[in-house]
Image (tube, grey):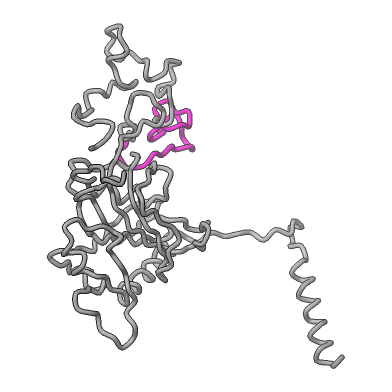
Amino acid sequence: MSLRKISFLILSLVLVFSACKKDDDGDGIIEFVEADRTEQQAIDNDSILKYFKNHYFNASEISSSTNPKISDLTFTELVEGESVPDGSILLDDLLDNPSATFELEEKEVFYAETDYIIYVLHINQGGGTTVPHFCDTVRVRYEGMLLDNTVFDSAVTPVDFDLLSLIPVWQKVLPSFNTAATYGDNADGTVAYDNHGAAAMFVPSGLGYFSSGSGDISAYSPLIFKFDLLQSFIADHDEDGVPSYLEDLNNDGEFLVNYDDLEDDADDDTDGDGVPDYADTDDDGDGVFTIYEDTDEDGDPTNDIGANNIAKYLDPTETESNL
């Protein structure tokens, strides 16, 4: 064995034992330090803006459709030296300069004590009369992509999601669009939706999977989601007779509990028990389920909605389904 090989072997063994050696605390655990959200937002935003500079979409094909949907929308990388094809628009050209048909909105939101920017390419607003609340159940078609245009998830047939079960960006963007204007059965048993909301959203990792990643999505990955918003259904998560969106007591589009000071500042938690009202069957902690509260003291709790007598705030025209 040559001296060079022996030296390399010794060096390799030293590195192995050094890596295995316990730290000063004696526990041998390497601490994971999560990225600062504000710093990561800046990195993600730069990555998204870079994507805009070298990707275009088939604008004329979308604008000529009488019922545009995300399956018609394609993003194509601009190869160095080539020009954007006729009928297409470079995403970067829409920033601060919307066309007559398309807008690339720079949407500012606040989440986890951090200011975020989401970019939303508006394809169609939707002609329905209702907009989903941040906590409702929605029926959508969608496609999720990485910034290298790799598709990691999709649903070409409609699926239902509780918005609270999804990553935060869905709760922040879908309430800006309307459901379909009409829908009806096709001869093959499928449902045809007309004039529904459609868009693509470009998402910083902090409103996606952030440090955890998921499946093919690595940690700190900005994402692209295309979606068709078809229908929406008002949710009552704890089945207490109060629609969940009305249990967002501070109207911030989130269900938060201040666990540091439950009694004095519990945000969306009336009785300070650590459970926000939307998931609490006894909002005021008096031992009577909210759905059985006789708030107007007429002896009949079936005419009342919720421990805080909020029935007067309900829109009587709003039903379980928005269509």
Q: Tell me where residue 242 appears, x and y as whole percent.
A: 33, 26
Determine if the magenta segment contains residue 83. Answer: no
Which residue is rendered at x = 39% and y = 26% of the image? 239
Q: Nearer the viewer, residue 18 or 120?
A: 120
Give the farthest residue toward the left: 100
Q: Tell me the residue at 32%/55% (across/down).
A: 227
Does 275 lie within the magenta span? Answer: yes
Residue 190: image location, x then y, percent: 31, 46
Taking depth in this image into account, of 177 and 150 the one nearest to the observer is 150
Of residue 268 and residue 235, the one placed in the foreground of this image is 235
Write down the region rendered in magenta. 250-276
Q: Residue extending furthest front? A: 187
Image quadrant in which you'd find residue 102: bottom left
Give the quarter of the image for residue 18.
Answer: bottom right
Quadrant in the picture for the N terminus:
bottom right
Q: Main secondary structure of the magenta part?
A: loop
Q: Residue furthest top?
A: 299
Q: Is 177 left, or right, of 209 in this rendering?
A: left
Quarter holding residue 70? bottom left
Question: What residue is at 27 percent from the left and 63 percent from the top?
Answer: 72
Q: Is residue 83 above or below residue 106?
A: below
In the rendered structure, the answer to whether residue 167 lies left or right of residue 25 reads left
* x, y percent for residue 322: 24, 37
Image coords of residue 162 (percent x, y): 39, 41
At x 36%, y 59%, the residue is 225
